[in-house]
Amino acid sequence: MVTTQTRPAAAQQRTRMAVIDCDIHPAPKSPKALHPYLSERWRKHRDTIGDRGFAGAYYPRANPNAARTDSWPPSGLPPGSDLDFMRYQLLDAWNMDFGVLQPLLGGGAQLNHEYAAALSSAINEWQIAEWLEPEPRLRSGLVVAYEAPDLAVAEIERRGDHPGFVQVMLGIRTSEPMGRRKYWPMYEAAVAHDLPIGIHFGSQGGHPITGAGWPSMYVEDHAGMSTAFQAQVISLICEGAFEQFPSLKIVLIEGGFAWVPPLAWRLDSAWRKLRDEVPHLQRRPSEYLAEHFWFTTQPMEEPPRASEFVELLDQASWLQDRLMFSTDYPHWDFDAPDQALPKTRLPAGFPEKLMAENARALYKLPTRAPE
Amino acid sequence: MVTTQTRPAAAQQRTRMAVIDCDIHPAPKSPKALHPYLSERWRKHRDTIGDRGFAGAYYPRANPNAARTDSWPPSGLPPGSDLDFMRYQLLDAWNMDFGVLQPLLGGGAQLNHEYAAALSSAINEWQIAEWLEPEPRLRSGLVVAYEAPDLAVAEIERRGDHPGFVQVMLGIRTSEPMGRRKYWPMYEAAVAHDLPIGIHFGSQGGHPITGAGWPSMYVEDHAGMSTAFQAQVISLICEGAFEQFPSLKIVLIEGGFAWVPPLAWRLDSAWRKLRDEVPHLQRRPSEYLAEHFWFTTQPMEEPPRASEFVELLDQASWLQDRLMFSTDYPHWDFDAPDQALPKTRLPAGFPEKLMAENARALYKLPTRAPE
């Protein structure tokens, strides 16, 4: 359910259930906001050369940071950049236990890998100093130069044990399918630090999103991004990443989840016919899917009949323990906590798990003290 | 349901229902089998330069033409190349009303577009002379140089009215998403000749199949090909192909269909938020999907519980009129007619529609005279 309406704080309905928001996008206050966290060499690089990536854009330009029209703080700062206003409009307004940040600042996918590593470190230090330390309800993803896994490993070693970071953060559009050996050292380091890998909608790896080239329109990227998620699930499973790293956990953020049962059917069917090609797989593909993947809810799946949502939960009942609520604040396609659940009879305990408890368990977040 | 077992003809169970097979792959008897249908200029080209396409392969090499181990004719010819043996093993064995050929001989996707057009014409003449005229139960797809739509239009004008051709044939992996204007002249010609566009698994357009590059394994292409189909559906709908050509019909061959309801939900949801970008769309994306698309069954969707197949038919009830049985003969992942339907209570009339009547209606095939 989507709302982009301005909701006066006084009128906002407190949800009775605990809420943990697994997809919040913090923004820098200005183009130079990361400078204090960069060395002189990379400050100069950022000022003179700047960011370079592959072509492609997934966000409409009508608003900076693809923001809700009501998300501009009274301070005049850009949407998502003002912690006080984020508290007012999101954390306090919905009485959230915790919120998990996903900074989308291009740190991981820079073509210049050394700059990617420096920018990732700067984003992480900026997160610690300006978000995680001032606000105990916030957690975040550790940004890493994931196309240069040796540099990603170094960042995980450097900051992976900071209590504010609850996962390692990647974009879904990588330069090679994510199951390939190139990325394994990064998974090994994440597992060693007990961190899931969180993979967010977007980014860019040099390849068009479809098997037939570049689509013309944003709406195609938006609706089609779930195919990129499906492809990464296939790759991670088929390449044997979960045999190599049995405790590896993957969080798919903003990629949907209604595609999970059909993909599981298809993967199992292909595996039954072609298992000689993947002798390293000890189990059916759907078993790895059920054991190793988590999903955030926004954009929520909205079948025309709410009963179809229940069928989906029945077809992959393990999803009840793996779906995690998210708003995508302050983005334009925000899902409000009181509108996220389908209006139908849901399995007992499932709403609580979706709204907070699945995330609390995965990210090892404490039960919030009574106020 | 898959069988690659040899079934002696005497033991083969006749299905009570009429059967029309919508995906049969004829093969040339030898590398020079197309020569009689090529001009001297292109015969020489084929002998000296040969086929050239983008990289990538989707079929295992264990058997030529990815064939069932029992599909080698006693004549010693390659699988799928002997019409008498195809009659014995497929058309007669299963008492089929009709079979629709899908020649996968690389005609459409050659990088040399003039050669693509010559090769396509040769394949079509070979089909008429060696398959369609000798066997009245066979129909086929008209092969065209679809990456050079002007040449494709010329071939549709040249041979589109031959009664043996019931659709224009494309591969799912094109060089641009299929909704783009480049391909519109071809759709215009197909509609003018009252021919659906049939789009088969495979081919190559120069792009990796995933948004993150080339997967390592065949099993990934096999399971992931449905993402290429999803992307083409998104493109055709969003670009407005069905507003431009209201009678355009698309047949998706060997791409699955369990992904249809989740894709419809996601497309409608994206469209509700972003319809300003696609003002040419007069209806919800799911309405175009329900009106313009047909699907063949092989490889059949095989949910772990047959009841989930019924849920799928309920979520997109129009699919009951759009699913068309296919075997993929002589390929290794053949679906036998007596094993294609899930073993569960299906909607009344649906088995007959799936096994023959949907294809009979779409392709305007006659009711078979009693024997």
Image (tube, coloured by chain):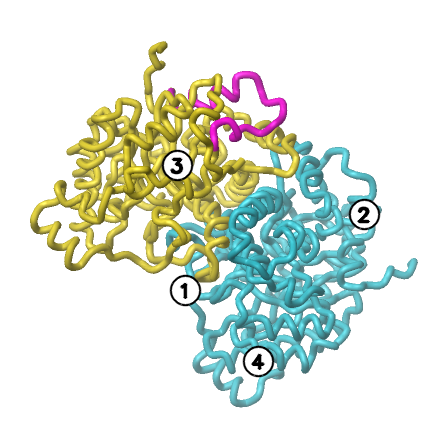
Chain colours: A yellow, B cyan
Image quarter where the C terminus of chain A lies is: top left
Mark linked to residue A329: 3
Residue under label 1, please give it: B55
Task: Please give the residue where the numbered disc 2 appears in the rendered image.
Answer: B352
Q: Which residues are magenta?
A: A336-360
Residue beneath the point at 11% across and 54% down: A44
Answer whether residue A150 is visible to the viewer in this image.
Answer: no
Q: Quadrant of residue B239?
A: bottom right
Kind of element beneath mark 3: loop
Q: CA distance from mark 3 to mark 4?
A: 50 Å
Residue B25 in magenta? no
Q: Which image quadrant for residue B365?
A: bottom right
Horizontal side of residue B58 vs B247, given as left or right:
left
Q: Is residue A348 magenta?
A: yes
| Structural crowding at the residue carrying mark 2, measured as other residues with C-alpha within 10 Å and reported as few (<14), some (14–19) or many (≥20) | some
Q: Earlier in the sequence, mark 2 or mark 1?
A: 1
Closest to the camera, between mark 1 and mark 3, is 3
Q: Nearer the viewer, mark 4 or mark 1?
A: 4
Specify whether B264 is left or right of A52: right
Image coordinates of residue A218 in percent, x first then y, are 46, 55
Q: Nearer the viewer, mark 2 or mark 4?
A: 4
- How far apart are the two marked residues, 2 and 4, measured between alpha carbons? 38 Å
Q: Are marks 2 and 4 in contact (CB under 8 Å)?
A: no
| Foreground residue among A69 and A214 | A69
Question: In this picture, is B160 found above or below A113?
Answer: below
Mark 4, residue position? B151
Marks 1 and 3 sit apart, C-alpha to C-alpha, by 42 Å
Kindly report the distance in space between the C-alpha atoms of the residues bearing marks 2 and 3.
Answer: 50 Å
